[in-house]
Amino acid sequence: MKFVSKRDTWLSITIWSSVLVMILAGFSPLFKSGTGVVGGTIIFLVCFLSALLTAWLWMATYYVLNESELFVRCGPIKKSIPYNSITKIQPIRSLLASMATSSQRVEIRYGKYGIIHISPLEQETFLTEIKKRML
């Protein structure tokens, strides 16, 4: 069962503004002399790749409840957590860096020290379904 990530409006504005600024910064060597072809190309590539990575992290964040594990994806980052290793699940509000795109999150503790924060759009359904699979 796949769950999309909830996205806070203020965070959406912040992320997409940052992507736009990075793209505009990448084109800045076209409007300023003195950077040269090599410098301009490096600036463009760094800015464009940073914007692409940021957009990828934002757009490709989701959570899948498989038969034996929770699969979490955030852009290029993937994490699988077996249900039998989960020790605690609780809803929280947090702004810590994580695989969540909202401040309304679910904290999952697993293994001895593992903690992950996720933000499924349908939080109640997610909690019900994951608890069923943990039994």
Image: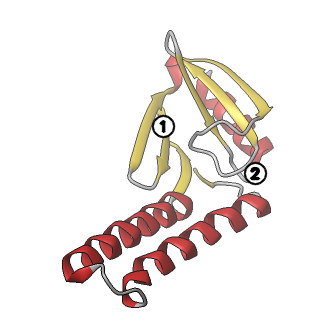
Q: Position of residue 132 (x, y in %)?
A: 67, 30
Quick one: which residue is furthest to the left in this view?
38
Quadrant placement of the C terminus: top right
Render colour scheme:
secondary structure
Left or right: 113 as drawn, with respect to 44: right
Q: Which residue is mark 1?
A: 67
Q: Position of residue 53 (x, y in %)?
A: 42, 62
Amino acid type for the residue under numbered disc 1: Glu
- Residue at image position (40%, 69%) is 47
In the image, 55 versus 62, the foreground residue is 55
Q: Which residue is mark 2?
A: 122
In the image, 107 versus 35, the foreground residue is 35
- Residue at image position (56%, 60%) is 58
State how far apart marks 1 and 2 are (Cα). 19 Å
Quick one: which residue is furthest to the front in this view?
34
Q: Is residue 52 above or below residue 74?
A: below
Mark 1 secondary-structure assignment: loop
- Quadrant location of residue 46? bottom left
The disc placed on residue 102 is none
Q: Is residue 109 above or below residue 79?
A: above
- Quadrant location of residue 12? bottom right
Crowding at dot 1, Cα within 10 Å, few <14 / some 14-19 / many 20+, comes out as few
Mark 2 secondary-structure assignment: loop
Q: Position of residue 18 (x, y in %)?
A: 59, 67
In the image, 29 versus 69, the foreground residue is 29
Q: Position of residue 89 (x, y in %)?
A: 69, 24
Image marks 1 and 2: residues in contact by CB distance under 8 Å: no
Q: Is residue 70 above or below residue 16?
A: above
In the image, 113 versus 66, the foreground residue is 113
Judged by depth in the image, the label closer to the viewer, 1 or 2, is 2
Q: Is residue 114 above or below residue 100?
A: above
